[in-house]
Amino acid sequence: MFKIAVLVSGGGTNLQAIIDAIESGSLKDVSIVKVISNKEGAYALERAKQHGIEARCIRPKAYADRADYFRDMIDDINASGADLVVLAGFLVVLSGDFVSAFKGRIINIHPSLIPSFCGDGYYGLKVHEQALKRGVKVTGATVHFVDEGTDTGPIIIQKAVYIENDDTPEILQKRVMEQAEWKILPAAIQAIADGRVSIKDGLAYIEGSISTE
């Protein structure tokens, strides 16, 4: 069984997409062994509990030193036996020590087609606001490995979503979630669990195809 730890900050819709994929059988031989949030009131924690998944809030402000905060998270994830760390709307900038501890074993879901609308300051609705402001006709979502930069790690999979004339940031966010994020995140996890994803020379390579239907 391939084990994952999911890090969240908010409602946990991408966490729910993973849970649904596991429970429906479309995501095979994968289990969520830990959910960690940096916010006590995150509904993602409640989602985890409803499905019998061990969940914990680890707040950065509870630690005098930020290094201690990340050390606690590293220890907790290691104790869970997780093979992969999934950032599913986790709005904390990771330390170099954390990234090094799970090098090549952290993935993130971002609500745009990287390298568009990504990097520092691009998260949540801000991404969709900027896409509409720029007037692009196609947006989407990206799953990528996490490195020391912001949204700079090797890209695993992307899925495009068309922008419509009457879109608001909220409407576009919902469509990107439904048509892209909730499909490609479980698909990427499955490909990694199956041992079909590798990193070479800063790029991710997939053996075979990844189905997002």
Image: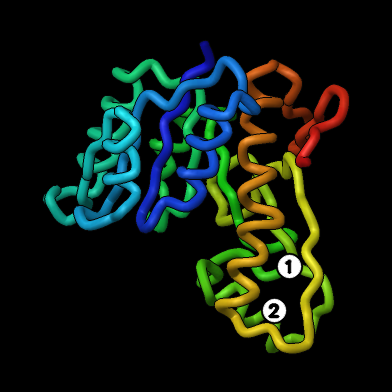
Mark 2 or mark 1, whichever is nearer to me? 2
The quarter of the image holding the C terminus is top right
| Coordinates of residue 149 in the picture (x, y in percent) | 56, 52
| Coordinates of residue 206 in the picture (x, y in percent) | 81, 28
- Closer to us: 169 or 85: 169
Secondary element under disc 1, as helix, strand or loop, is loop
Give, as a three-letter code, the residue at label 1.
Ser
- Closer to us: 87 or 204: 87
Give, as a three-letter code, the residue at label 2.
Ala
Name which residue lies at 67% across and 35% down.
188
- Left-right relation of 102 to 75: right
The answer to whether the residues at label 2 and label 1 have Cβ atoms under 8 Å apart is yes
- Closer to us: 128 or 53: 53
- Quick one: which residue is furthest to the top in this view? 1
Disc 2/disc 1 C-alpha distance (Å): 9 Å
State the mark number for residue 104.
Answer: none
The residue under label 1 is 116
State the mark number for residue 131.
Answer: 2
